[in-house]
Each structure stands twice: as structure tokens, then as C-alpha cells.
Image: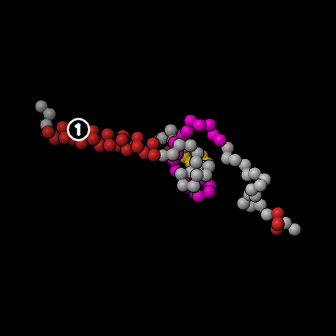
Amino acid sequence: MVSDAILFAIAFVGFFILRAIAATIIFFFILPAGDRCPMCDAHTFRVQSKGWNLLMPWFRTSWCADCGWEGLLRRSSDPQVAPPEPSASQPHKLQVPPSLDA
């Protein structure tokens, strides 16, 4: 016969493992997919992180140059789209407006 303590330990460990699996699945779907920053919606850069990429290769380690956010994103099935180039009607942040040119 199996003692009550062993049955309790098996049930306790089983519930702990099930809780960890459920939390992992929920957090996976909470993470945004794609290459957009969850804080400012700008394009992010992929960052090589040996630890994260070895442990969880299905995630994408990213960094946002606009707001400084860094974290994990889900890989998307959409092809990578380059950010739009600034048009001639919208000057870049570092360009001098034509009214100030001498």
C-alpha cells in the first residue's frame, strides 16, 4: 500500500507542474508577436542573447532604439517588413528646415 504522505507529495508536485505549464502557455500568448515595440509601437532590432536563444529559441530577443525597451517577442509568421523611409514632405529629425538655411 502507498502511504498518504506519498500520495499527497505526488498530487502536490503534479499540481505545481500543471500550474507552471499553464502560466507558461498564458505568458506565451500575452507576449506580442512581430517586431513592434509593445511600449511605443516602433520597429525593434533583434539582439543576440546566447542564454535566451538557447533556452527559448521560439522567442525573439529585441531592443527598441526609440524608447530603450528590451525584452522578448514571439516570432511572427509574417515576413519582415522594413520600416517606411521618411518622405520628402516630412523632414527627418536631424535635418535643418529650409527656412533656416542661409
**Can you name the residue that lies furthest to the front here?**
89
| Residue that label 1 marks | 10
Kindly identify the residue that appears in the image at 87 percent across and 68 percent down.
Answer: 102
Q: Can residue 66 be seen in this view?
A: yes
Kindly identify the residue that appears in the image at 82 percent across and 66 percent down.
Answer: 99
**Can you name the residue that lies furthest to the top here?**
1
Tell me if residue 74 is in the magenta stretch.
yes
Q: Classify residue 16 by image quadrant.
A: top left
Q: Which amino acid does label 1 sit on?
A: Ile
Q: Give the range drawn in magenta.
A: 64-81
User: In x, y percent, where is residue 90?
Assistant: 74, 56
Tell me if residue 59 is in the magenta stretch.
no
Q: In this view, does 1 lie above or below 85?
A: above
Q: How is the image coloured?
A: secondary structure
Q: Classify residue 13 by image quadrant.
A: top left
Element carrying mark 1:
helix
Q: Is the magenta stretch mostly helix, strand or loop?
A: loop
User: In x, y percent, where is residue 20?
Assistant: 35, 43
Q: Can residue 63 be seen in this view?
A: no
In the foreground, 65 or 9? 65
Kindly identify the residue that appears in the image at 67 percent across and 47 percent down.
Answer: 83
Q: In this view, does 10 lie above or below 64?
A: above
Left or right of 98, for residue 71: left
Q: Quarter holding the N terminus?
A: top left
**Can you name the residue that lies furthest to the left here?**
1
Q: Is residue 14 above or below residue 71?
A: above
Left or right of 15, for residue 21: right
